[in-house]
Amino acid sequence: MNQLKTVALLGLLSGVLVGLGYWLGGTGGALIGLIFAAATNLFSWYSSDKIALAAYQAQPIEPQQAPELYAMVEKLCQRANLPMPRLYVVPSPGANAFATGRDPNHAAVAVTQGIVQMLPPDELEAVIAHELSHVKNRDTLTQAVAATVAGGISYLAQVMQFGMMFGSRDRQGGNPLGALAAIILAPLAATVIQMAISRTREFEADAGAARLTGNPRALARALQRLEAGARQMPMRANPAFEPLLIINPFSGQFLSNLFATHPSTKARIENLLKIEQELAVK
């Protein structure tokens, strides 16, 4: 179901782009904007591991430095039929984790010092299984596609804005109110859809982790601990990289459902408990 939601949301995002391009008139500037957006996001996707790891000052760790962690990841990778990712530790007391990399052969998994100290082994295993599910599902590629299309929409909206400023007329007869609405609403709609895609990928990774470990309740407990920990000790992080993390790291921040990068912890736990019931029946 979440896969279908992701495809539908990507289609809707593309529809917004096509509609805005039609409004603008299919000009050469629109094509240049799309090429520019694609090139920018392709670079971001190709270098996503380096960018994210550098943003969090993640340090590589060797097997002899964390033998238990390495053994845990190796076991999960064997179950998931995935190559072993590079492992990193983030020097932060905040409890969190993320996966990055353009494909399973170039993946990296990073955990904070705080999450290793906070979670018992079964819950830490569930968190790592969640991150490996992101790798297996190629969610970095999905997010790159969404970012590319959203970038194209923002560029076209800027083209329309400059057109209004310098007195050009759009193909709809120069309706300034319609053009103004498109300039404001199209990027807003793109952001809302992009965040919705991020939330569906979190649900999918939770489900993948539950099935990989066979212990959905361990991830449910981990999410509860991580949310409580984020309230007490917010993680210093760049908001641009928030969608990568397993849980929102910012305490006391109001986020509406429309603009949240993650589903609510309550909704995630309820979904995990449903999966637990499904697994018990099988």
Image (spheres, rainbow, N blue to C red):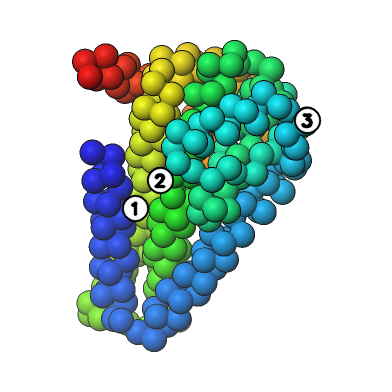
Circle nearer the viewer, 3 or 1: 3
Measure the C-alpha gap from mark 3 to mark 2. Answer: 29 Å
**Residue beneath disc 3:** 65
Q: Amino acid at mark 1?
A: Ala
Residue drawn at x 64%, y 15% is: 118
Amino acid on which disc 3 is placed: Gln
Left or right, 110 with respect to 28, comes to right
Q: Which residue is mark 2?
A: 137
Q: Split into 4 quadrants, where in the image is the N terminus?
A: top left
| Marks 2/1: CA–CA distance | 25 Å
Mark identifier at residue 26: none
The number of discs equals: 3
Identified by mark 2, the residue type is Asn
Disc 2: CA contacts within 10 A as few (<14), some (14-19) or many (>=20)? some
- Determine which quarter of the picture holds residue 170: bottom left
At x 65%, y 31%, the residue is 70
Q: Secondary structure at mark 1?
A: helix
Q: Is residue 191 visible?
A: no
Instruction: Indicate whether 117 appears above or below 135.
Output: above
Where residue 50 appears, as percent x and y from the top left, is 67, 54
* 66 versus 156 height, above or below: above
Horizontally, is 20 left or right of 37 in the view? left
Give the residue at mark 1: 189
Q: Earlier in the sequence, mark 2 or mark 1?
A: 2
